[in-house]
Image (tube, rainbow, N blue to C red):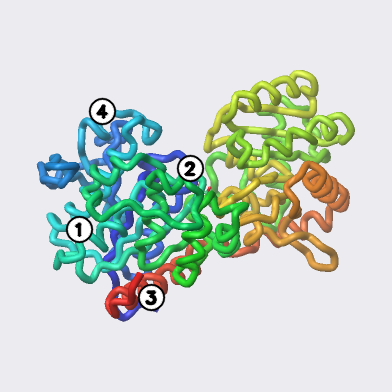
Amino acid sequence: MMPTSPFNVLYLSAEMVPYARTGGLALVAAALPRALRQLGDDVRVILPRYGLIDPEQHRLERIIESFPVPFENGMEMAGLWQARDAEVPTYFIEHGRFFGDRQGIYSFPDDAERFIFYSRASLEACRRLGWQPHVIHCNEWHTALIPNWIRTIYAADAFFADTAVIYNIHNLAYQGIFGHRVLEIAGIASYGFMVHPQVSSGLNEAVSMMARGIIFADIIVTVSPTYAREILTPEFGEGLEPVLRDRQNRLIGILNGIDLDRYDPAADPNLPAPVLADDPKGRTACKVALQAEAHLPIRPQVPLISVTSRLTDQKGYDILTTVLEPLLRHVDAQWLIMGTGEQRYHDLLSDLQRRYPDRLALFLTWEERLARRIFAGADVFLMPSRHEPCGLDQMVAMHYGAVPVVRATGGLADTVIDHHPPVVGTGFTFRNYDGMALYAAIVRALEVYRHPSVWSAIQRQGMGRDFSWTQPSYAYQDLYRRARSLKLTGAPV
Ligand code: GLC
């Protein structure tokens, strides 16, 4: 089981639980490095030391007072901290102006500078630690210049001579698009601006950090096999499909897992009762408690449909809101929607909630505790995303016994098996992105819900699936091996 030669892997992500989290990336960044360490690789993580990370709570200690990082035309000083008790060695780049003085993670006017600095400081930190990475695993646009640097300003640097770079796309919709000046800040302006004949002029006149990662990495990986195919098309490629097609032979999709230590429905302290695959009593208790908490009528038999995603179009709210009112009016089902997002959806849902108080409960917030109670207590878990690179919640929902109704896109297509008698599925899927297709899938699910034995067979099927990180971590290890051999044989990128 142990690989013959464990790798030193530097894993870089702008967010990671428990330190800083906005989305699924933070969960993946915690779970994958841990799974890889269990396979024997020396994986280490570096994060920015955002002001919101409490040094006492996480037992951070400063290990390097101050070291210089090339930045723009000169040097900026950084400090290096380490979390004392972390299972995966985790370091933090300290810089007051860029990170320490800010409470948030993203959406500052100088985000380009901040993440270029974080990326460059992370490379220099390895040198300071005397720890030579065999592979650098970069995530999202925040670290996308690293593959570019390794092929340019670090090309003649002995310390990184054998370092291969993996570039991991989690969501192509966030590319990090900036003006030409970012190349000066990053010290690569002299290598020129890049244009691609098939890319739209808008993108050619700007710097897409994501594009740089795709062009220069030894291997590009994204978070599901279906998404890896979808992004080669204009519908999903966000304008980068020509660049991705050029590098298609280096592009692969590996499905994310979920952290089964984190999500254990049989022993989740947030639930009123343990949820077990072979005993429905626990789920009934969870459903009743959820109805009470949501101020819905306590009716264990009525189907309870839930949605917990951000209130945005990407997550399917544009089509959901075209069918929600007819469903509320005509179908005896309860709805529970939790999330925050675009104001127009806050308003529209609040209005529906006022008009259908016995059928719709609305939580305009996002709470982990409530999310877990929803996975355990709702019957249907809805994720009608327009695009979904992987999606983690549908897996957690199945693991907790909720039956997903999803659009068959990206990781949703790769994780939910449509129930199609005689094949017992794990949920219900629809293909076309429109209200009618969504409506039909919901109705199909509610029809099956009327047959408790079939419904519980679907639930058991979902709860029995292996969503752990075991397989994915082997796949990443293979990828590291492949990237290394491509690098060492000097194969052109
Ligand atoms: C992004 C994607 C989501 C994926 C997550 C983790 O948030 O939008 O689909 O599950 O990254 O890879």
> In this rendering, would 19 be left or right of 188?
right
Give the crowd class for mark 2: few <14, some 14-19, many >=20 residues within 10 Å: few
Spot occupied by residue 460 in the image (x, y as percentages of width and height): 71, 59
Q: Which mark is residue 323?
A: none
Q: Which mark is residue 482?
A: 3
Spot occupied by residue 11 in the image (x, y as percentages of width and height): 32, 57
Question: For the residue marked with disc 2, what is the amino acid?
Answer: Gly
Check disc 3 and report its element: helix, strand or loop. Answer: helix
Mark 2 and mark 1: span between their CA atoms? 32 Å
Between residues 470 and 388, which one lies in front from this camera angle?
Answer: 388
Give the crowd class for mark 1: few <14, some 14-19, many >=20 residues within 10 Å: few
Check disc 4 and report its element: helix, strand or loop. Answer: loop
In the rendered view, would you say 2 is above or below 47?
below
Asked if the beta carbon under badge 2 is closer than 8 A to the nearest atom of ligand 1, the reply is yes
**Mark 4 vs mark 3: in front:** 3
Pointer 4 or 3: first along the chain: 4
In the rendered view, would you say 243 is above or below 81?
below
Q: Mark 3 and mark 1 in contact (Cβ < 8 Å)?
A: no
**Residue carrying label 1:** 153
**Residue carrying label 4:** 101
Pointer 4 or 2: first along the chain: 2
